[in-house]
Image (cartoon, grey):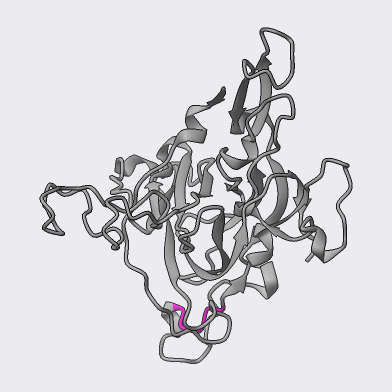
Amino acid sequence: MTKYGAASLATILLCSTLTVYGGSTGNPTPGSPHDTLNFHLKKSASGVVGCSGNGHAAFVRYDDTTGQVLPTDIYISMIDWEQIDNDSDGFFDEDVPDGIDNDFDGLTDEDGIEPGASTGFIDCDGLDGDVTLQIRDTEPDKGVISTHEWFIRMSGKPEENFAFWTNADQVSCILTEDPDGIPLSGDEVVDCSYDNSPWVQLGYVNLASYDGGCVKQVKLGGKNNAKGGGKTPFCDMTSEFEVDVDVNGDGIIATDPDSGEQDQYLFSISCVDVPETTEDESATCPLSRMIWEVDEVNTTTKAKVQVFVGHTGTARIKGGKISGKGSK
């Protein structure tokens, strides 16, 4: 039997519409579904912000007396979305939970959208120190997820900045009980939780200098000079989501591309199977997640950040131990 911690079981059903992005240089691949996310700095004394669960804006807080940005961790996760025809009528997701018989079959709410299909901030307010974001999976097959291109830039006034450390957080499974002392007998109890292992630090993103700089550039001499006119470039931070993974447990990251150990997409990595049990934990545990740890020193109090997430590829989910950032 496998027990999952509360944080590992936190899932939410979010609903949204796919959009197509026309794109230009420095943005997600043209024609691919994408999500646009916005981060704002907000005074801590201004009250709690309500979150609907499918919004695309979040708030990092700062002390309006001292001007100090408050410690904030931004948790980013995915769920393997599997599109299912729950009522076997040949259609998908045509009768969502709303109390109405949308497909006129005499039943209500029997074919809704499965978890993982939508992007939204589950917790959009960093007043308590945490922000939680779920990124949608656009690949409907079980065991396969969509992969992404990540782009970021400052979107507010010039001379503002946003900085954070990137960390991988992976579920680890620990054998806690084996009453008969016989492996694979079926009475083993395993605890699987994000809390069972420390974060793996991947990198550092400072928009003032990352990838040549992603902050607003002032256009000197223009009519918007006083207001900070000028173009703000996007920075490609996709590599922050690529990790090296020890798949076979030998402690070595194979460089052969066919090994599937170098430069793997973070959200495609589950956990390591516990060999003493009959269950394959790597097939059922939550996927690894990203944590942005806000740098309070180098983040300014009027920062506004825009993030584009392009859904451009796919990857098969697999187990393995994340060892660090990819080689790219």
| Left or right for 219, reference 167 | left
Image quarter of the N terminus: top right
Q: Which image quarter: residue 211? A: bottom right
Q: Position of residue 185 (x, y in %)?
A: 68, 18
Q: Which image quarter: residue 33? A: bottom left
Identify whether 158 is placed above or below 168. Answer: below
Q: Position of residue 201 (x, y in %)?
A: 72, 46
Residue drawn at x 50%, y 92% is 221
Q: Nearer the viewer, residue 174 or 154?
A: 174
Identify whether 123 is placed above or below 211. Answer: above
Residue 232 lies within the magenta run: yes
Q: Position of residue 325 (x, y in %)?
A: 75, 54
User: How many numbered dots are placed on residues in this image?
Assistant: 0
Q: Is residue 41 visible?
A: no
Q: Nearer the viewer, residue 263 or 87?
A: 87
| Left or right for 275, reference 187 | right
Image quarter of the C terminus: bottom right
Q: Position of residue 206 (x, y in %)?
A: 64, 61
Residue drawn at x 50%, y 83% is 30
Residue furthest top in the image: 180
| Left or right for 263, reference 35 | right
Residue drawn at x 71%, y 30% is 274
Decide whether the magenta segment is chiefly helix, strand or loop.
Answer: loop
Q: Nearer the viewer, residue 156 or 175?
A: 175
| Left or right for 302, reference 3 | left
Q: Which residues are magenta?
A: 228-233
Residue 70 lies within the magenta run: no
Q: Is residue 249 visible?
A: yes
Q: Nearer the viewer, residue 163 or 243?
A: 243
Residue drawn at x 43%, y 67% is 35
